Image: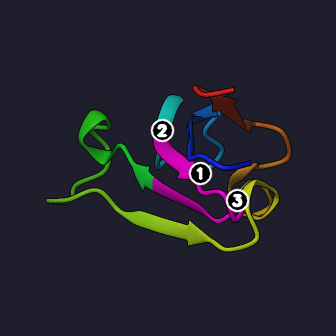
């Protein structure tokens, strides 16, 4: 892969009751496989913060899903193929 690929983090069920459902974050995967996401807190009335949180996953999409996948309740939806 020689370009950045964008994606959405889509949550079907919010087991924690914090981030909501639907598109909860957007992100990018860099040519090395490294992923960076930004939470869409401003679209969730239950999260009170002045800025969106960011998170990095050097191990790529598999690491991201291991942390935020919630046993299949959250998936990556690729914007760029």
Q: Which residue is mark 1?
A: 16
Label 2: how many Cα within 10 Å (few below 14, some 14–19, many 20+)? many
Secondary structure type for disc 1: loop
Give the mark nearest the N terminus, 3 or 2: 2
From the top left corner, tell me how far across and down residue 63 is, in percent: 77, 65
From the top left corner, tell me how far across and down residue 4 is, in percent: 56, 47
Q: Which residue is mark 3?
A: 64
**7, above or below 35, in the image:** above
**9, above or below 51, in the image:** above
Labelled pair 3, 1 in contact (Cβ < 8 Å): no
Instruction: Decide which of 46, 52 is in the foreground and name it.
Output: 52
Q: Which residue is mark 2?
A: 24
Residue 75: which quarter of the image? Answer: top right
Q: Is residue 3 visible?
A: yes
Give the label, 3 or 2, closer to the camera. Answer: 3
Q: Which residue in the rendered view is the most extreme toward the left?
A: 50
Q: Give the quadrant of the C terminus.
A: top right
Q: Residue at x 35, y 63 (%)?
A: 53
Start-end of magenta stretch: 25-37
């Amino acid at each position: 892969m020689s370009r950045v690929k964008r994606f959405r983090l889509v949550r079907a069920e919010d087991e924690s009751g914090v981030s909501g459902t639907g598109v909860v974050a957007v992100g990018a995967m860099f040519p090395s496989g490294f992923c960076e996401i930004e939470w869409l807190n401003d679209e969730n009335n239950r999260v009170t913060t002045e800025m969106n949180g960011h998170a990095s996953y050097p191990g790529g999409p598999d690491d991201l899903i291991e942390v935020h996948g919630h046993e299949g309740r959250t998936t990556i939806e690729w914007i760029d193929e």
